[in-house]
Image (spheres, rainbow, N blue to C red):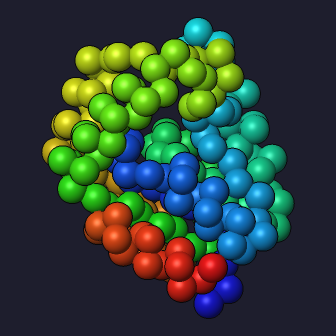
Amino acid sequence: MTMRRIMVVGCSGAGKSTFSRRLGAALGLPVTHLDRLFWRPGWARAPEDEFHAAQQEIVESDAWVIDGNYGASMHLRLPRADTIFFLDFPRRVCFRRVLVRSLREYGQDKQAPGCPEHFDREFYSYVWRWPKDHRERTVRRLADQGAHARRIVLTRPREAEEFLRRIG
């Protein structure tokens, strides 16, 4: 199974960034975290044209792992992806992970430069509502625009770990 252009999607807290880093290391592929392209210091959003142009430059290359949803720009990534990982973990797993991350990384800017981790009720609400408000739209986009790609759905952290162990 050759994987050269890989998307990793799923709810915040599913572990997309960690999974992508480990997958990229195992396959020798460069990894891009969309949060680092989208967020500017102070949690300011990048202008849409800059965010899209940065993604376009990456997807035009021959090999990449890109993690992040950003549904409004999936149309840039999906046509070029040969493999899509959907970390479709239970809400309780994702919610617990974002809370733990907020506590563990509070004040650190690990998601994006100049964007320190903080307690954000709106974000927690987004994560809690993701299965109801965003999951089906993501599934439809993957089916409609990514039907040509191999789609791998992992529903538990243990499955993701086992997959990484097998290819590593």
Residue 24, image quadrant = bottom right
Q: Is residue 135 visible?
A: yes
Image quarter where the N terminus lies is: bottom right
**138 or 102, which is in the foreground?**
102
Residue at image coords 18%, 47% = 92
Q: Is residue 39 above or below residue 139?
A: above
Give how far across and how far down residue 29 sits, in percent. Answer: 76, 66
Residue at image coords 30%, 32% = 99
Q: Is residue 30 above or below residue 133?
A: below
Q: Residue furthest bottom?
A: 1
Give how far across and how far down residue 85 sits, in percent. Answer: 47, 67
Relative to residue 111, is residue 65 drawn left or right?
right
Residue 154, image quadrant = bottom left
Q: Is residue 47 visible?
A: no
Residue at image coords 37%, 51% = 14
Q: Is residue 154 above or below residue 125?
A: below
Residue at image coords 61%, 63% = 22
Q: How many marks are shown on the rendered structure? A: 0
Residue 46, image quadrant = top right
**62 or 97, which is in the foreground?**
97
**106 or 36, which is in the foreground?**
106
